[in-house]
Amino acid sequence: MNGNLLSTLWPQSQLAHKAVILGLGVALLTLASKVQVPFWPVPMTLQVLAVLMIGASAGARLGAATVLSWLALGAVGVPVFATGAGLAYMAGPTGGYLAGFLAAAAAVGYLADRGHGRTIVSAVLMLLVGVAIIYVLGLGWLANLIGAEKAVTAGLLPFIPAEVLKVALGTAILTAAWKQAKR
């Protein structure tokens, strides 16, 4: 059985269904951007979890289209990001992470389209691929702005505990959803 979660639940999905799913995904990602969870050493948002779940459930095309739509709204000034909006904001320190969100949604979606993410092990690995993509692009961009050592110190190390938690939570959500879908 191949295919992502949404294509399994709605195999005959029409364009209208996909448009609704895209809109709901943009709303979910916007809400996830605004929710800050107190965490040590820095507060975390739920953006990464939302991006990973959008890719894992909607697949490569719809997942990437959802994140791209969210990025387009932010580019024209709609306040969908955690803080700030517009092209200048997107070119700042978070720009690489934002690009990473798009690449991660597409990559996780690609893997989900091929049947990954149904078991605990494959879900963890798939979500870790997504997190790695986000951080490789994010740190690469940030390193150009502040240097590699500072980028790792400020843009990766404080977030590792939160990312581990998000991968665990995403794995639990995804595998539970697949168990329900099989019924």
Image (cartoon, rainbow, N blue to C red):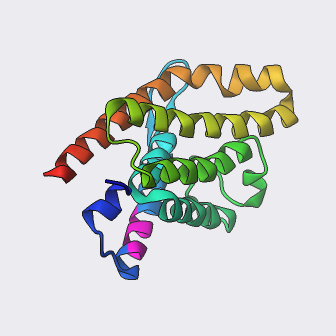
Q: Position of residue 44 (x, y in %)?
A: 50, 32
Q: Is-magenta flag for residue 9?
A: no
Identify the residue at image location x=82%, y=31%: 143
Q: Quadrant of residue 77?
A: bottom right
Q: Position of residue 30 (x, y in %)?
A: 48, 55
* Residue 31 in view, yes or no: no
Q: Is-magenta flag for residue 21?
A: yes
Going by the image, does 175 lie left or right of 111?
left
Asked whether 118 or 136 is in front, the reply is 118
Q: From this view, report whether residue 30 is shown above or below residue 153.
A: below
Q: Position of residue 2 (x, y in %)?
A: 36, 55
Identify the residue at image location x=18%, y=51%: 182
Q: How many marks?
A: 0
Q: In this picture, which residue range is highlighted in magenta?
A: 18-24
Going by the image, does 140 lie left or right of 158?
right
Q: Quadrant of residue 78?
A: bottom right
Asked whether 169 or 29 is in front, the reply is 169
* Residue 85 in view, yes or no: yes
Q: From this view, report whether residue 111 is shown above or below residue 170.
A: below
**Outermost residue toward the left in this view:** 183
The rendered magenta stretch, by its main secondary structure, is classed as helix
Identify the residue at image location x=70%, y=24%: 154
Q: Position of residue 37 (x, y in %)?
A: 43, 32
Going by the image, does 36 lie left or right of 175?
right
Identify the residue at image location x=51%, y=47%: 108
